[in-house]
Amino acid sequence: MSILIKNVILNKEKKDIFIKGNKIERISDNLNLKADDKIDGKEKKAILPGLINCHTHSAMSLLRGYADDLPLKDWLEKKIWPLEKKLSQDDIYFGTKLAILEMIKTGTTTFNDMYWRPEAAIKAIEEIGIRAVVGLVILDSNPFGSIKNVKNYSEIFKKRKFKNITFSIAPHSIYTVSKENLIWSKKFAQENNLLLHIHLSETKKEVDDCSKKYKIRPVEYLDRIGLLDKNTILAHTVWLSDKEIKILAKKKCQVVYNPCSNMKLASGFFPYEKLKKAGVNIAIGTDGAASNNSLDMLSEIKFASLLQKINPMGRLLSNGIDERKLTIAPAYDIFKSATENGAKALQINSGRIVQGKLADFILVDLNHICFNPGYNLYSDLVYACNGDCVSDVIVNGKVLMRDRVVKNESKIISEAKNRIYLKA
Amino acid sequence: MSILIKNVILNKEKKDIFIKGNKIERISDNLNLKADDKIDGKEKKAILPGLINCHTHSAMSLLRGYADDLPLKDWLEKKIWPLEKKLSQDDIYFGTKLAILEMIKTGTTTFNDMYWRPEAAIKAIEEIGIRAVVGLVILDSNPFGSIKNVKNYSEIFKKRKFKNITFSIAPHSIYTVSKENLIWSKKFAQENNLLLHIHLSETKKEVDDCSKKYKIRPVEYLDRIGLLDKNTILAHTVWLSDKEIKILAKKKCQVVYNPCSNMKLASGFFPYEKLKKAGVNIAIGTDGAASNNSLDMLSEIKFASLLQKINPMGRLLSNGIDERKLTIAPAYDIFKSATENGAKALQINSGRIVQGKLADFILVDLNHICFNPGYNLYSDLVYACNGDCVSDVIVNGKVLMRDRVVKNESKIISEAKNRIYLKA
């Protein structure tokens, strides 16, 4: 299978791009090669790496709008958890499909998932063709999250070949997984060459509880028990001390910034600037739809930048405008976090449009209002656009959206709508 | 002219709606009236009041993405102001058209504008047919903002009849307009039955400078010189003391919350909860595209809610999650701010779908992913949707967008694109 992409804008220049199999084979000014498929950008579309959503719970799209504006305890204990308990494997499959559809429509080509019953997500991912890192969840209180279960899954998945799927082991958090099981998770990840994906320091309570119990903070705790290295993806990392940031840098950990979720759940302010200065790789995620409620990464990155500019951990509150603050988290850096840095975090050979990379990319419609008059592509992408500026999505050399049309779109939506009877 | 809207969802029920002239004439379960035009929602579209953007500088859409991520002083003095000086009347006309197109595509039916040369905005507004309150700007340093100029405009506009346009007098701010000219503005507004639209307390510096100069804070200053009443619209109002909030409530002033601009320019945190508790009418605006960079009100309202939930003026910083914070600025209240409260602020008989109101409304596509599975329309609108869920826009009884198509859309975009040569 090959695709010839004609007349697209790449770094302000018109280019032709030849996709062979699942790779970007050639980029040149003018290519006239035979190909199985052709897309002509007519100089009105720009090519960009696909967005990479580095932390989500895709099946939770089925809970979008189910419970909002409630105190955290009521939200979780009276609404979200009781409803989640009722989710069948089919519900998870349909919810994941709804999430994948939303991600494709808004330009995401890869997501890092954490949810029960990975077989349901895998079915959805393989059917639609997006790329994903599927988490095998460890959670002490839930039978689905047992070590036994994860071992079983691992045995089953080892016997299969996956085109677009790799795996992580995903111990839920330090407050829901015992020290022994955390240590087991890392060992299992190392033995099986898996990433490790965990929530960390999302709330101040989590940090306080850890400090009380272990006399050290969460990052120090994970470091002490050997969980931190470049294969570890830490979601949220809102409450970090300077010492913890140094450890994350030294151990080359991956951190994921989830601005909407941190705002909606009043979790706190992700220390973007300190982490960046320390050289930590910062990726971006939407979290699940219950705490966002959108998986549109082009919406998310505006929050990612703007929240940093007003982050009161700086000098805003005492002195009014800090001149420097407006320059924090500039558009290009944030876009890079949502693409190249995400690819690095998930160890996927994508995130940039260069020869030899995986053919995971998007075309955006430069005639969309958000790109006009058109001074700066990255400013427009981050501050003015949402996912509806994306016209075409290619993953692993396969066209998943063409001129905003995704296969079976209305079926996926109506299947999700049919699950609305679900109540806690 | 009449329109019959069939089978749309209003408050969870299927309704038919009959528009006669520029009014909502009848709402009923089943209407079979003759009409000049018909729109069938097929039970897949919901009808909602149009969004009301209560503070913007529409022509600045021509500067979208021109200068971002710079220190405030450089941004204004080296980039925005020098470029603005070069804007011709045509530029303002084309920029305003681009802004209006974006607003219609994203469901805004009325905007409150503040920019030079209102004749250019008026031409654009009348051509496209959106509703607007056009500001006659007073700015001491600029010949376009002189009292003489405003008197001239007023004389000219008095002789004309406008369908969709009303006027405000718009002294730019307390730091750019003298006390005498502020007092003159209010007197002129009263004599001519105009609203008064002014930036107030956007930055801490503005408050500090005012306090130094007059020994009172900005709201107290405006109150002392007689500018505050229900006809006064105050944009931003970020830095308010409790005493000032009491004054705003007592004088029944209108305040406009501009979350994206406040975040992007690191202005500060709008005291939503205190203002709401005091009973002040809170509307929402996008500000201009140079400091946002989008005019999509459905994107803006997510920022409006989420910024309040993480607003550190509460107890977040010292104690971690404040349970109460997640319930602040709930979806329905924020949607009301962007519709009904905006109509109240601008004294326009719209903002709700009831008989007798102006026919200023939108239809949204309930099959859009953001409304699915579909637990709560207002949660979905505020937290999950952007403007691309809007399918149809009706203003003053006239269809401005039908199934996402606006007349002359590509022409308006290419005209704006042609102005890209503009540089500071």
Image (cartoon, coloured by chain):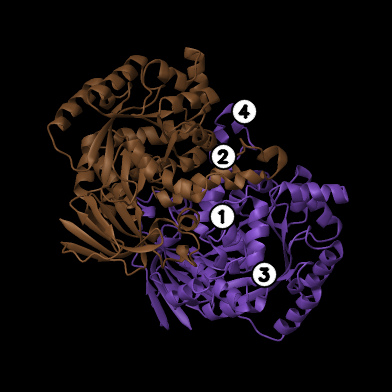
Chain colours: A purple, B brown
Q: Position of residue B110 (x, y in %)?
A: 31, 45
The Cα atoms of the two marked residues, 4 and 2, are separated by 13 Å
Residue kind at label 4, given as amino acid type: Ser
The residues tagged by marks 1 and 3 sit, at their Cα atoms, a distance apart of 18 Å
Tell me the element at label 3. helix
Q: Secondary structure at mark 1?
A: loop
Closer to the chain start, of discs 3 and 4, is 3
Q: Which residue is mark 4?
A: A318
State the residue position of label 2. Answer: A310
Q: Amino acid at mark 1?
A: Asp
Picture layout, residue B420 above or below residue A177: above
Pair 1/2: label in front: 1
In terms of depth relative to the viewer, which is nearer, A394 or A240?
Answer: A240
| Upstream in sequence: badge 3 or badge 2 | 3
The CA distance from mark 4 to mark 1 is 32 Å
Identify the residue under disc 1.
A68
Q: Nearer the viewer, mark 3 or mark 2?
A: 3
**Same chain shared by disc 4 and disc 2:** yes
Q: Decide: marks 1, 3 in contact (CB < 8 A)?
A: no
Q: Which mark is residue A273?
A: none
